[in-house]
Image (cartoon, rainbow, N blue to C red):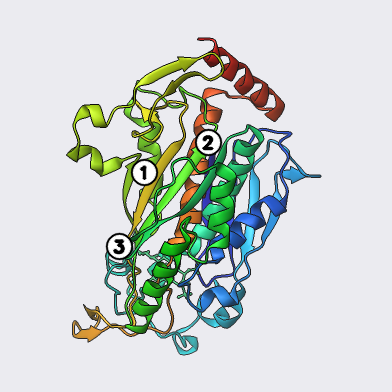
């Protein structure tokens, strides 16, 4: 299973094509719209989210509520395009028609300067339109297809916020999947800890007032993945490695941890590794889950717990200095609108990005063209593991 996305932030639409989804899998646009709506929410978002109402048009690969086995094409329209038609149109224009204000001032922390150098554009709008995190809506659409596939296989996944601006949400290892989903959905910052939620909101408001931005830590929690998905035999089949790559490819993500993560560097081995146990009902399990569900590039059958670190939003109302690429003069960056904190939205993006990697790995291990056959194969495998 793979996917591609296309589209610019203020262009007509975002397009996603997901290929390799088995046939006969239940799938409706409601599955996808629910995820898109969740990505739009969260305290700290800017004015753009008041303009957009992200809804998917399924343009191929689904009929009467089921996947066909053909590529699934999805379109999300940019409502803001109506304000940008002159600037974002695809037809050639002459110099005297060119009313565009070219972007010649690269924003620190964005792709602007490196992208302009790489692709030879002197108008950096050609870079920023595609490098914008608007594209994460298209990635969430792909991930929502993957999430649907996983849910049909009894594999459940949720993303929420663990930390914003240094304020940490308390850890609740015993909390059930449905409580995680419900509590994070009710929180304006997608945290599981109501006391921390309020402090996080205050920190976001303060940063906004100061013209600054803040980052944080998102966590994704997965239940129901059987042991042995992924592989130890080659670097590019290690599933934890693939997840780390996918998470750090999300705009503004700068680090990934599994389980206790970097804390492992500070502990002795006896306080890091998870002892193995067995009982008749569960089969093999670990007494603790400090390694977050992975050993040797494969799932252990314990919940997968992965964290991603998001840097503060780079566009600041408090301007940072940069250099104009035409005049080579320094300037202070000025902006019209931006998010001040997008960590709650990013948790939803991360959830869907991880879901895609998991679904892809499941399909590699159980390559079935028809969804009911995939489901039967996974259930047989679960029984095999239990009796191993
Ligand atoms: C959901 C989401 C929303 C974002 N919103 C903004 C924003 O409003 N303004 C901004 O400057 N950056 C925003 N970013 C971050 C930038 O897209 C990102 O920092 C930039 O593309 C450079 O990529 P890099 O930080 O991965 O190097 C957002 C990121 C995400 C995940
Ligand atoms: C549009 C989205 O996020 C955008 C991501 C983004 C950036 O630079 O990454 C900058 C802002 O765009 P604009 O300049 O149009 O307000 C955000 O609103 C979205 O998440 O759907």
> Counting residues from the N terminus, which is met first, the one under dot 3 or under dot 2?
3
> Counting residues from the N terminus, which is met first, the one under dot 2 or under dot 1?
2
Image position of 329 with respect to 131: above or below: below
* Residue found 62% across the figure and 33% down from its top: 154
User: Mark 1 = which residue?
Assistant: 245
Which of 372 and 163 lies nearest the eye of the viewer? Answer: 163
Q: Is residue 258 left or right of residue 301?
A: left
Alpha-carbon neighbours of circle 1 within 10 Å: few (<14), some, or many (≥20)? Answer: some
User: Of discs 2 and 1, which sits in the foreground?
Assistant: 2
Residue 8 in picture, x, y percent from top left:
50, 66
Q: Is mark 2 within 8 Å of ligand 1?
A: no
* Residue found 40% across the figure and 74% down from its top: 202
Across the whole image, how many numbered discs are drawn on residues?
Answer: 3
Instruction: Answer yes or no: is residue 130 visible.
Output: no
Which of the numbered marks, if any, corresponds to residue 223? 2
Q: Quadrant of the N terminus?
A: top right
Distance CA(mark 3)–CA(mark 2): 27 Å
Distance CA(mark 2)–CA(mark 1): 21 Å
Q: Quadrant of residue 299?
A: top left
User: Mark 3 = which residue?
Assistant: 166
């Amino acid at each position: 299973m793979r996917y591609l996305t296309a589209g610019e932030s203020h262009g007509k639409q975002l397009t996603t094509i997901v290929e390799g989804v088995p046939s006969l899998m239940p799938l409706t646009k409601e599955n996808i719209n629910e995820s898109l709506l969740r990505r739009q929410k969260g305290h700290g978002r800017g004015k753009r989210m008041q303009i957009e109402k992200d809804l998917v048009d399924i343009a191929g690969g689904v009929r009467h509520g089921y996947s066909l086995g053909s590529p699934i094409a999805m379109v999300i329209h940019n409502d803001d395009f109506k304000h940008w038609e002159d600037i974002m149109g695809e037809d050639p224009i002459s110099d005297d028609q060119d009313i565009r204000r070219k972007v010649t001032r690269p924003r620190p922390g964005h792709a602007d300067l490196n992208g302009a150098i790489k692709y030879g554009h002197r108008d950096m709008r050609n870079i920023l339109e595609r490098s914008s995190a608007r594209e994460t809506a298209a990635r969430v659409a792909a991930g929502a297809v993957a999430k649907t596939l996983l849910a049909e296989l009894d594999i459940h996944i949720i993303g929420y916020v663990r930390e914003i601006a240094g304020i940490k949400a308390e850890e609740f290892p015993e909390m059930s999947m449905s409580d995680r989903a419900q509590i994070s959905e009710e929180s304006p910052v997608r945290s599981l800890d109501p006391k921390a939620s309020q402090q996080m909101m205050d920190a976001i408001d303060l940063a906004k007032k100061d013209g600054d931005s803040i980052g944080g830590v998102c966590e994704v929690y997965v239940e129901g993945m059987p042991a042995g998905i992924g592989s130890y035999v080659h670097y590019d089949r290690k599933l934890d490695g693939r997840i780390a790559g996918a998470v750090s490819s999300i705009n503004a993500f700068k680090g990934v941890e599994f389980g206790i993560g970097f804390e492992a560097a500070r502990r002795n081995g006896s306080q890091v590794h998870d002892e193995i146990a067995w009982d008749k009902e569960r089969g093999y399990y670990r007494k603790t889950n400090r390694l977050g569900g992975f050993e040797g590039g494969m799932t252990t059958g314990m919940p997968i717990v992965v964290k991603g670190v998001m840097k503060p939003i780079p566009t600041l109302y408090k301007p940072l200095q940069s250099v104009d690429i035409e005049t080579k003069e320094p300037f202070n960056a000025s902006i019209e609108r931006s998010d001040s904190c997008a960590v709650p939205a990013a948790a939803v993006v991360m959830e869907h990005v991880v879901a895609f990697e998991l679904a892809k790995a499941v399909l590699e291990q159980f390559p079935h063209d028809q969804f009911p056959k995939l489901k039967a194969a996974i259930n047989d495998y679960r029984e095999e593991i239990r009796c191993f």
